Image: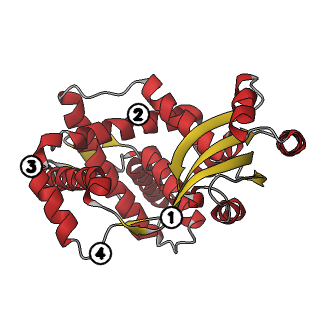
Amino acid sequence: MKVGNLATVVLVAGMLLVSACSKPAATVNGKKISRETLEMHLKERIAEHRGQNVTIDDKKLRDSVLQELISERMSLDEASARGITASDADADKEIDAIKKRFGDETFQKSLKEKGLTLDAFRKRMKEKIVLGRFVDTFAKDSDVTEAEILDHYKNSPKPFLKPFRVNMKIVEFQTEEAAQSAAEELKRTTADFDRYADQLGKDNKANVTDYGWVSPEFFSPSMAAAIKGLKEGKYGGPYKGQKSFYLVRVKEREPEGIAKYDEVKEMIRRMLLQQKRTEAYLKWLEQKRAASKIVINLS
């Protein structure tokens, strides 16, 4: 082959390669899903899988993520047509809840691992909120009847168990020193736990949660074990939680057992409602896909 012809072949091949790479990952009814968007979501999913020690098949995962993005694109377009939106404030509320649960440092580390900026994560959160609100439109609360709830309770293959729980007052400190100091003063003065805890709350020395039923498993393993050992009317601590230190007083204890209908009725109602919404949404999605023009450009 002559040098000139070879150069032409190389040039054409290069142009074809650039053209292929410049194509979006897919189009849905003419709307693009960019390769950058696919890679961002793929990186996020890979980070999640690695955190769970899940074996990754790159091609299958890429195809799966792209199919999810296609479904999301159709759903978000329909949600927009129906006037369903989410604000930055809605997203920030969810982000603040994540930071409160896991801590800002862990949150920032997670963003870095997933290759996301805060703005990109906020945009993603808004989309998730819109998708949730969209799915919610596929069934109303009234679509779940009392008869359906009772039937599910009676005929469930497994009984509805209620875990061991305690009704307790929780005093949360930010430092071990503050918690230890309060515990020593409480012991030295033999003060009433409730009055002492309430005063700490008024003085902004601790966060106080008044009596409420909780499962000890909500806390760290060592703290859960200690709470399980507390008798009614007794207090203990300081205990080290995930991020804070605690003093607690147990008012009542309730053993594990089979839950009564009234105790799980609302939980069953929410579960059945979500099932109805999901089934109706998936049916809509199947019909929407069949009626849509979807072009995938991945090789």
Residue 17, given in percent of the width and then of the height, sits at: 43, 54
Nearer-the-camera pick, 104 or 8: 104
What numbered label is drawn on residue 53?
A: none
Residue under numbered circle 3: 291
Residue under numbered circle 1: 164
The mark closer to the camera, 4 or 3, is: 4
Is the residue 216 above or below the residue 204 in the image? below
Residue 219, given in percent of the width and then of the height, sits at: 63, 56
- Mark pair 3, 2: CA separation: 27 Å
What numbered label is drawn on residue 126?
A: 2
Dot 2 amino acid type: Lys
Asked which quadrant contains residue 88, the reply is: top left
Residue under numbered circle 4: 158
Asked which quadrant contains residue 217, the reply is: bottom right
Residue at left offset 48%, top offset 63%: 2
- Mark pair 1, 2: CA separation: 37 Å
Give the secondary structure at mark 1: loop
Location of the C terminus (image quadrant): bottom left
Is disc 3 surrounded by few (<14), some (14 to 19) or many (20+) residues within 10 Å? few
Dot 3 amino acid type: Ala
- Mark pair 4, 1: CA separation: 18 Å
Residue 30 appears in the picture as rendered: no
N-term-proximal mark, 3 vs 1:
1
Dot 4 amino acid type: Lys
Q: Is 81 situated left or right of 195 in this image?
A: left
Residue 211, given in percent of the width and then of the height, sits at: 56, 42
- Mark pair 4, 2: CA separation: 37 Å
Residue at left offset 21%, top offset 55%: 272
N-term-proximal mark, 4 vs 3:
4
